Amino acid sequence: MYLRNRIIWHFGHGLHATKRFSGRYETVLWFTKTCDYTFNLDEVRVLSKYPRKKHYKGDKKGKPSGNPLGKNPSDIWEFALKEWDNELWDIPNVKSNHPEKTSHPCQFPIELVERCVLALTDENDWVLDPYAGVASSLIAALMHNRRAMGAEIDKENGYIEIGKKRIYDYYSGNLKIRPLGKEVYKPTGKEKVSQVPIEWN
Ligand SMILES: C[S@@+](CC[C@H](N)C(=O)[O-])C[C@H]1O[C@@H](n2cnc3c(N)ncnc32)[C@H](O)[C@@H]1O
């Protein structure tokens, strides 16, 4: 197996540790079996920081230097893992629950898997998630016309049923999904929860 990327999925919130630094990332390891593999960069490009940047010399002088489809998203990914964290999201006018949240304690955002599916597979390819939980990976695959299969060991907590329901809900248009690429909410500092409590002054 060849390690192509060690991707850091960074998220802003989570449990607050007291005996070590709080964990704010997970690692996604992308391996390929051979040197012949799929990588659809154009499917997952993101907006360039400076799209108007131009070549300053040579044949292309004065022409835009970037790719009109955007830039490579790099190996550091930022998706909102816990928009449902009340500590941050208990803000008037902002949803206090992530739209995808189920009872599964360590569910992934569908958009995290969507980027992998779009970049690393083609339509009609198979996506296998051997630790399927509530089927986030399977849904991400089905959303983009891939075939999907999963395994889940936990019967007690009903994850398989929840996963199946989410798949049915997706096909009937009733699954709430956080859209791929939606910007992660950044507090402006004016929200009540962003301010230093009066008691600390
Ligand atoms: C990190 S969670 C995956 C969550 C999933 N990505 C989602 O968004 O719902 C890992 C899951 O793997 C399941 N699991 C653990 N060992 C397993 C095994 N040997 N076979 C199948 N599933 C397993 C656990 O029950 C748990 O639901």
Image (tube, rainbow, N blue to C red):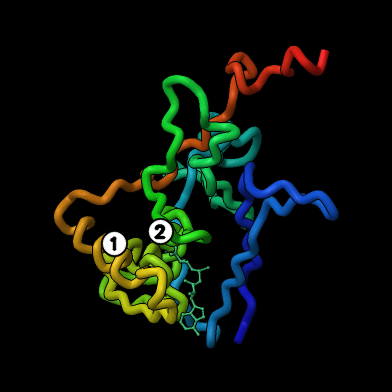
The front one of 31 and 178 is 178
Image point 42% across, 53% down: which residue? Answer: 111
Label 2: how many residues lie within 10 Å, few (<14), some (14-19) or many (20+)? many
**Amino acid type, label 2:** Glu
Question: Contact, CB < 8 Å: mark 2 with mark 1?
Answer: yes
Q: CA distance from mark 2 to mark 1?
A: 8 Å
Q: Please give the residue where the numbered disc 1 appears in the rendered image.
A: 144
* Secondary element at tag 2: helix
Q: Is residue 11 left or right of residue 106?
A: right
The front one of 18 and 169 is 18
> Where on the picture, by quarter, is residue 161?
bottom left
Where is residue 12? Give x, y as percent. Answer: 63, 42
Image point 77% across, 15% down: which residue? Answer: 199
Where is residue 71? Give x, y as percent. Answer: 53, 46
Q: Is residue 36 left or right of residue 136?
A: right
User: Can residue 100 be seen from the camera position used here?
Assistant: yes
Where is residue 139? Give x, y as percent. Answer: 32, 63
Is 25 rendered above or below residue 30? above
* Secondary element at tag 1: loop
